[in-house]
């Protein structure tokens, strides 16, 4: 039995997306659905780049996400983050 996916799923096309087009579609979907979020977790894999940006993971028992805090923002922060520290942050989700 053949099923025409263009009928059952209008997002499916006979023309393949490029990887870049797929990433752009995913990023738009995420960024439109989650403009600004507040999330809590534990700092992991914290590094300070030569640029002044901070890179780290925010994790809990179920998952982790990669984060960046740009130099202009982290200079105004009143503390230095530490590995394993529990924090809450407000940020923009992007891909």
Image: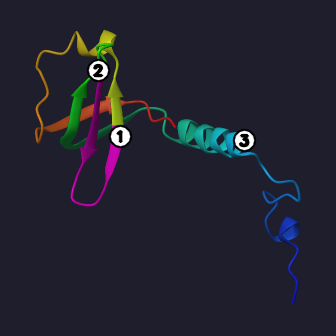
From the image, give the main secondary structure of the stretch colored magenta: strand
Q: Indicate whether 11 appears above or below 93.
A: below
In the displayed structure image, the side of residue 80 where residue 70 appears, left or right: right
Q: Secondary structure at mark 3?
A: helix
Q: Residue at x 26, y 42 (%)?
A: 58
Foreground of the two, 27 or 18: 18
User: Is residue 60 located in the magenta-colored stretch of the structure?
Assistant: yes
The residues tagged by marks 3 and 1 sit, at their Cα atoms, a distance apart of 22 Å
Q: Residue at x 20, y 42 (%)?
A: 44
Which mark, residue 66?
A: 1
Q: Position of residue 52 (x, y in %)?
A: 28, 13
Q: Nearer the viewer, mark 3 or mark 2?
A: 2
Foreground of the two, 62 or 16: 16
The residues tagged by marks 3 and 2 sit, at their Cα atoms, a distance apart of 30 Å
Q: Residue at x 19, y 15 (%)?
A: 77
Q: Position of residue 41 (x, y in %)?
A: 21, 45
User: Is residue 10 located in the magenta-colored stretch of the structure?
Assistant: no
Q: Position of residue 5 (x, y in %)?
A: 83, 70
Identify residue for label 2. Answer: 49
Quadrant of res 38: top left
Residue range highlighted in magenta? 54-66
Foreground of the two, 89 or 24: 24
The residues tagged by marks 2 and 1 sit, at their Cα atoms, a distance apart of 15 Å
Quadrant of res 31: top right
Q: Dot 1, how many residues are within 10 Å of its Cα: few (below 14), some (14-19), or many (20+)?
A: few
Identify residue for label 3. Answer: 21
* First-in-chain label (3 vs 2): 3
Quadrant of res 23: top right
Q: Indicate whether 20 appears above or below 73.
A: below
């Amino acid at each position: 039995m053949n099923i025409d996916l263009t009928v059952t799923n209008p997002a499916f096309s006979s023309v393949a997306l490029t990887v870049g087009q797929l990433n752009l579609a995913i990023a738009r979907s995420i960024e439109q659905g989650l403009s600004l979020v507040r999330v809590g977790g534990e700092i992991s894999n914290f590094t300070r780049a030569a640029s002044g940006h901070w890179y780290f993971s925010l994790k809990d028992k179920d998952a982790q996400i990669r984060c960046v805090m740009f130099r202009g923002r982290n200079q105004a922060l009143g503390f230095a983050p530490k590995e394993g520290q529990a924090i809450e942050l407000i940020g923009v989700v992007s891909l």
